[in-house]
Amino acid sequence: MEESPVRFELVDINDILKTLPHRFPMLLIDRVINIRADYSGIGIKNVTFNEPAFQGHFPERPVYPGVMMIEAMAQTAGVIGIKSVEGTQKPRAVYFLTIDKCKFRKPVLPGDTIEYHMRSIGRRKTMWWFHGDAMVDGQVVAEADVGAMLTD
């Protein structure tokens, strides 16, 4: 099967800040790459030890929280959705609707780079659903179906 053409090769942190309302400490992606015409793309997160979550999760054995990976999947999906909608005012608010079929497979540690491989699995008006695979070094560490709603 042939891949859809790339519409946005790189959405860097400056463009993400213009696209999403999230800010530190809740902005959980560093960039989004290869947003395709089929509404798929890859969010990138460089996990570092100085992240606020590691102060309490867990000081003796730092593990990146799974819930933050799911939020980052939704943020990646939000960037893909917002960038893909043409002829509208931006930025727009993105609200989480659903989390389904969520599984955590392996722990993510400081020094890892997480790739959030997101692809659209449905859309109705301003509501979008995506399947996401969080990957580190080519291995799936988490997966979920997430739904979000874009609003003005």
Image: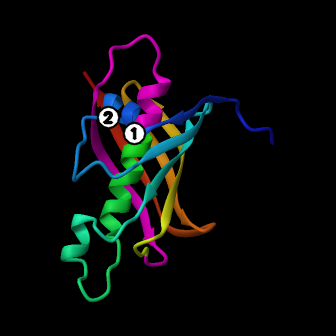
Where residue 82 appears, as percent x and y from the top left, is 41, 28
Instruction: Indicate the amino acid at tag 1.
Output: Ile
Where residue 35 appears, as percent x and y from the top left, is 57, 35
Q: Secondary structure at mark 1?
A: helix
The residue beneath circle 1 is 13
Nearest the eye: 62 or 99? 62
Residues at circles 2 and 1 in contact by the CB criterion of under 8 Å: yes
Q: Inspect the magenta stretch and tell me whether residue 35 lies in it.
A: no
Q: Residue furthest top?
A: 87
Nearest the eye: 91 or 127? 91
Region rendered in magenta: 78-107
* Crowdedness near tag 1: few (<14), some (14–19) or many (≥20) residues, C-alpha within 10 Å: some
Q: Residue at x 27, y 65 (%)?
A: 51
- In the picture, measured across the screen, residue 88 lies left or right of residue 86, that is left
Q: Secondary structure at mark 2?
A: helix
- In the picture, measured across the screen, residue 135 lies left or right of residue 102, that is right
Q: Residue furthest right?
A: 1
Give the Cα distance between marks 2 and 1: 6 Å
Q: Residue at x 22, y 49 (%)?
A: 24
The residue beneath circle 2 is 17
Q: What count of labels does the image hold?
A: 2
Q: Residue at x 32, y 86 (%)?
A: 61
